[in-house]
Image (tube, grey):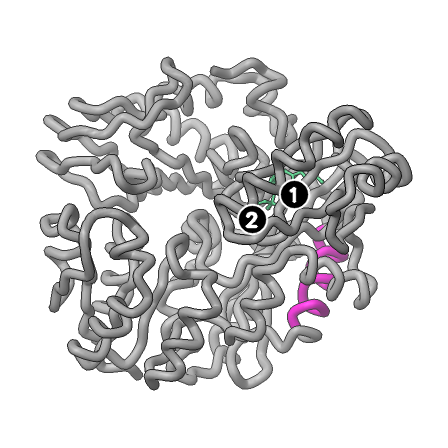
Amino acid sequence: MFKRVLIANRGEIAVRIIRACRELGIETVAVYSTADSESMHTEIADIKICIGPPQVTKSYLNISNIISAAKITKSDAIHPGYGFLAENSLFAKECEKNEIIFIGPGYELMDIAGNKSMAIEVMKKNKIPVIPGYDKGLDDPGFAVRTARKIGYPVIIKASFGGGGKGMRIAADDKDIKTLLPLAKSEAKNAFGNDHVYLEKYILHPRHIEFQIIADNHGNVFSPGLRECSIQRRHQKVIEEAPPVNISRKTVELMEATVLKAAKVLNYQNLGTFEFLLDSKENFYFIEINTRLQVEHPVTEMTTGIDLVKEQIKISSGNDISDIRKNYFSVKTNPDRQRASGHAIEFRINAEDPENDFMPSPGKIDYIHLPGGPGVRFDTFIQCGSTILPYYDSLIGKLIIWGRDRNESLNRALGALKEFKIEGIKTTIPFHLKILGNKNFNEGNFSTSFISDENIL
Ligand code: ADP
């Protein structure tokens, strides 16, 4: 096992990883920008080291500063969390060059997954269903129009190296393609450093369903279940659940077989998520692989009892997962192939003002009262007196609720969100309460366009 792990991240995920290391008896190193010198992750780690000024390019994205911090502190491994450098294969390569273990899959795999159109090609070759589209690069608008017509409108233009729901454009006709293609390309170039885009049929009212996988370096791989991530705002997840509602066992089994086949083909190691869109007839289509811990990993933890972060760290240090795999399958008496115990739901609490177009709401937290009780978990880095900084993303915590079934967890969630009090900044709590008050949401009757369809603002 590692002696010391550096966490190349901040916020709630840095705190989450430090706690997992602590349980494993591993010393932790927190890195921080000058703006974050008093942030919770720096207080609870064994060692803290400054890696630069507030701007992310100069601190949390600064590969050479982070590698130097790991060397100075004699860290054996780096956990990247999610976001920042978590999917940067160059960073993983630099870690290897410096004999530091990168906690994640190998960089060859990150290279495939990081280029979405390449990942789609690999899936297609292995007969895994993908969305009809064109992924070989689109430079000429005339060619793009002919291709879009062949696919059939509406189509979606997506950045091959994109992420976080950014840079996607929906085109309803030839005119849209001509105007949106150059925009999408320049946006992709600015945001992701590469202007490669591809076209996909735009699926109307799909659900976003994803599979968590765990794989070790010894050829063992299994899935501890799937998650529903259809409640989205501007293609970004807002609420996630495990297991999904209203999905047939047959589809779950088929999807799982597909995922495990893909993981084997790719010789996948460590944690990963295979994302799919599911249409109203339960046809499913691969969209992408995330080669890292997901923001929404706790809903899987709450329904399986597996600590995904601890397992991830153990796998990177060479552990064999056959035991947890065996226990996972043998202790379950539930014949349901979804294998989930109970139901969990996660609400992303952001420092944003839902009444003002979700404008970021940085500032000092003057007062906070956290909800509690059975089945209530809050992963965060904030406390009374904390300052939410304008330089970083607005996620201040994740409220994760577990119940014996979906009704119980939704009911518990309603109580917890009502009890939750934060003063000094605006948050998305009122927005979540509106969703919880929606009949279709409660009945499990929704798709990725739920928020706009139901006009929840
Ligand atoms: P990112 O990596 O930026 O999150 P994804 O490819 O995972 O991008 O897609 C994010 C979301 O965008 C999906 O969950 C879905 O809501 C929407 N989306 C992406 N592709 C399509 C598509 N072809 N048809 C309909 N919706 C799509």
Q: Is residue 8 above or below residue 26?
A: above
Mark 2, ligand 1, within 8 Å: the answer is yes
Instruction: Indicate which disc residue 162 carries.
Output: 2
The answer to whether residue 387 shows anywhere in this view is yes
- Drawn side of residue 199 relative to residue 385, left or right: right
Mark 1, ligand 1, within 8 Å: the answer is yes
- Drawn side of residue 108 relative to residue 316, left or right: right
Viewer-proximal residue among 375 and 455: 455
Other-residue count near label 1 (Cα within 10 Å), few / some / many at <14 / 14–19 / ≥20:
many
Real-space Cα distance between discs 2 and 1? 7 Å
* Residue positioned 26% across, 40% down in the render: 391
Quarter that holds the N terminus: bottom left
The kind of residue on which mark 1 rests is Lys
Residue range highlighted in magenta: 252-263
Other-residue count near label 2 (Cα within 10 Å), few / some / many at <14 / 14–19 / ≥20:
many
Which residue position is annotated with label 1?
A: 158
Q: Quadrant of residue 112?
A: bottom right
The kind of residue on which mark 2 rests is Gly
Viewer-proximal residue among 197 and 8: 197
Marks 1 and 2: in contact by CB < 8 Å?
A: yes
